[in-house]
Image: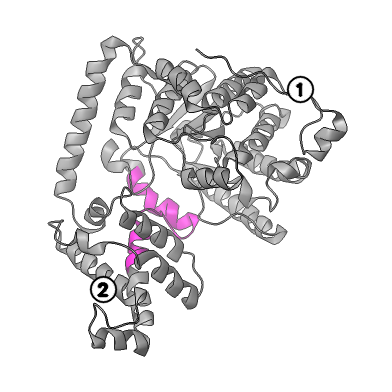
Amino acid sequence: MTSLPSSPPQLAPESCAAAALPATRRSALRERIDAAWRQPEPICVPALIAAARLPDALREPVHTLAHDLVTGLRATRTRSSGVDALMKEFSLSSQEGVALMCLAEALLRVPDKATADRLIRDKLADGDWRAHIGNSPSLFVNAATWGLLITGRLVSTSSEQGLSAALTRLVARGGEPLIRKGMDLAMRMLGEQFVTGRDIDEALKRGREHEKQGYRYSFDMLGEAAMTAADAERYFKDYERAIHAIGQASKGRGVVDGNGISVKLSALHPRYTWSQRERVLGELLPRLKALCLLAKGYDIGLNIDAEEADRLDISLDLLEALATDDALAGWSGLGFVVQAYQKRAPFVLDFVIDLARRSGQRMMVRLVKGAYWDAEIKRAQIDGLAGYPVYTRKVYTDVAYLACAQKLLAARDAIYPQFATHNAHSLAAIFHLAAADGRAWQPGDYEFQCLHGMGEPLYD
């Protein structure tokens, strides 16, 4: 295993302040996290492969279970209809599928007609909708595909080439408002597939049916980062209301058997960035602690959601402050989300596991692949950086996920692992690894998670 590069020399206090760095030296675990930030893949990937490798005895059982899951899922989806069939045709691996998902999520929050028109035009004009016509046995999907094809043509051109004069005149006479209305209805139907409700009360009501099947929810809220103090205050009140509603509905079931909440820190402070470290610790930490105390009172879980790579360091500062706060002692609901596609992920887990043991309180860790890949790559390129904070190939992220999963399974005394995955092989590997030592699963051992409306068929 290649060793990490040595940490940089300690700066003078005045230099630390100018660079928005802490005045005191970081712990060895935090320095290892910093050192792994943009490691070259030829250095970090071989170590991941070794850590992710399955024992010989498990390879065949894992392969068999993954094969059975995928085969069963494909058979089920072949007979699907409606929105599920539409998602099968326009998967997130296609440009058109990504465009539809962006549109579905965004139209739920667009307040004005002009912005909705521009959004539809932007997302649909360049899609290759014709390629999807006739691929699905679902009448609903084929009708929707023809609608998307015509809509894409209508909003992408005002000329007569490729369209009849009548269609061109339709645009000129107000076709976009008509299209907007139809697309708004369709995308809201699609969005509701992935959004449990317009508010927390509706979300809890719609989630009850799934709860009967054994599912539990960690609710989060759609929205952008706070741009102003007023935005942050509004989001804080929304989180407060949500925790009260979730806690009252939970009725004392506890962190594992009850629903919880995920909090996005960029929604709670308009300057949640590494360059404003002292301000964030002074202003955001009290707000976050207040939400945690509220969640503790109801004995529900609260996960600190993952965001962009350059915010990881300050989020770890906040997590450490909360974990070591006496006011939160005795609560096992404090959680943290770790992105496996970040090169720092294994070292972040080392820190969080150590923090849980130091605090004497078991903590939740949700392991995800990561959702900001495009932005992370582009930001590194724009800044002219020598490397990337995330892996450049999906297969490396898959390997990292398994390496991190094994690290979490080995620390179940201090960590409650939450494996968020829609990958059948990852699920099968974790399932068998967790029981490799003869350990029988019981509530509170670990759990799998999926996105609402997307991953349930794999777990059903």
Q: In this figure, which residue is indicated by the disc labeled 2?
A: 150
Please name whichever residue, 420 or 383, is drawn nearer the observer in this view of the structure: 383
Which is closer to the viewer, label 2 or label 1? 1
Residue 173: x and y, percent? 35, 90
Q: Is residue 200 magenta?
A: yes
- Mark 1 falls on what kind of element? loop
Q: Which mark is residue 217?
A: none
Q: Where does residue 191 sit, x and y in percent of width and height?
A: 37, 59
Label 2–label 1 contact, CB within 8 A: no
Other residues around mark 2 within 10 Å, as few (<14) / some (14–19) / many (≥20): some
Q: Position of residue 74 (x, y in %)?
A: 18, 41
Vertical position of residue 36 compared to residue 261: above or below: above
Residue 107, image quadrant: bottom left
Determine whether, in the image, residue 337 is placed left or right of residue 237: left
Image quadrant in which the C terminus is located? top left
Q: Earlier in the sequence, mark 2 or mark 1?
A: 1
**Residue 94 within the magenta-colored segment of the rendering:** no
Magenta range is 186-210
**Kind of residue at badge 1:** Pro
Left or right: residue 9 versus residue 457 is: right
Type of the residue with mark 2: Ile
Any part of residue 56 in sight: yes
Which residue occupies 23% across, 66% down? Answer: 144
Comparing 210 with 312, the one in front is: 312
**Residue 402 drawn at (x, y percent):** 40, 24
Judging depth in this view, the residue of 449 and 161 nearest the camera is 161
Q: Is residue 274 above or below residue 148?
A: above
Q: Is residue 92 above or below residue 184?
A: above
Give the colour scheme shown: one colour
